[in-house]
Amino acid sequence: GAVVSQHPSRVICKSGTSVKIECRSLDFQATTMFWYRQFPKQSLMLMATSNEGSKATYEQGVEKDKFLINHASLTLSTLTVTSAHPEDSSFYICSARTVMNTEAFFGQGTRLTVV
Amino acid sequence: GESVGLHLPTLSVQEGDNSIINCAYSNSASDYFIWYKQESGKGPQFIIDIRSNMDKRQGQRVTVLLNKTVKHLSLQIAATQPGDSAVYFCAEKRGGTGRRALTFGSGTRLQVQP
């Protein structure tokens, strides 16, 4: 299957700083990318849908000014957690899909710890 | 609200036995379903999918059954192995283009006893 690479896999940052997470589709063009958040022992919760070249669509309750999403190319989307706080500590996962494909391919996730 | 949910949070089976993981969904407009396996600290890994115009699909050691009448989805794993231990999620996609996100169920942890 297609490969989605997410970087970094782990990051620790101080409260108040910003962290950028990258999601790359390595062997296909991803017209749509999705960002999920997962707390321990819970399911994946969709944060936002990102279409290349347009603004991301955020789910209800997700602060767009706090979780900045950029999808500047067909192979790269970034999620920036701004002014991070300990409650932002979580596992963030991206997935990518082309319009023609229904299956979504997932990155390996990023474990964010805010101290 | 509409959701995809699972009946059992944890399933423990003996190595070599068959496993059945169940999932209930409530949106009749869903037209595509996927089962994912997630190991600790990793992203979901695609196992098998099925479209709503089918009721059964088989892969290598896995079978997915879809019952649209009762909005029920199941994943059957034959001859379960220790490497199958993980959390399994069902996910649905509602009708439309590939731009729609998947909605995930709450997950079932499969524990395979040697």
Image: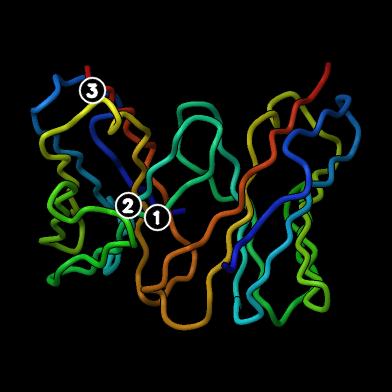
Residue ID for mark 2: A35
Nearest to viewer (mark 2 / mark 1): 1
Task: Determine the secondary structure under disc 3.
Answer: strand
What is the spatial separation of the Cα atoms under label 2 and label 1, in whole angstroms?
6 Å
Q: Where is residue A38 in the image (x, y as percent from the top left)?
A: 43, 39
Residue at point 75% right, 33% down?
B10
Q: Where is residue A35 in the image (x, y as percent from the top left)?
A: 32, 52
What's the residue type where badge 3 is placed? Val
Residue at point 36% right, 76% down?
A99
* First in sequence: mark 1 vs mark 3: 1
| In this picture, residue A22 sits left or right of residue B112 | left
Residue at point 19% right, 53% down?
A77
Q: Residues within 10 Å of mark 1 (few under 14, many from 20)?
A: many
* First in sequence: mark 2 vs mark 1: 2
Chain for mark 2?
A: A
In this rendering, does residue A29 appear at all? no
| In this picture, residue A46 sits left or right of residue B104 | left
Q: In this view, does B28 lie above or below A72?
A: below
- Asked whether disc 1 touches disc 3, contact meaning CB atoms under 8 Å apart, the reply is no
| In this picture, residue A4 sits left or right of residue B37 | left
Q: Where is residue B62 in the image (x, y as percent from the top left)?
A: 76, 50
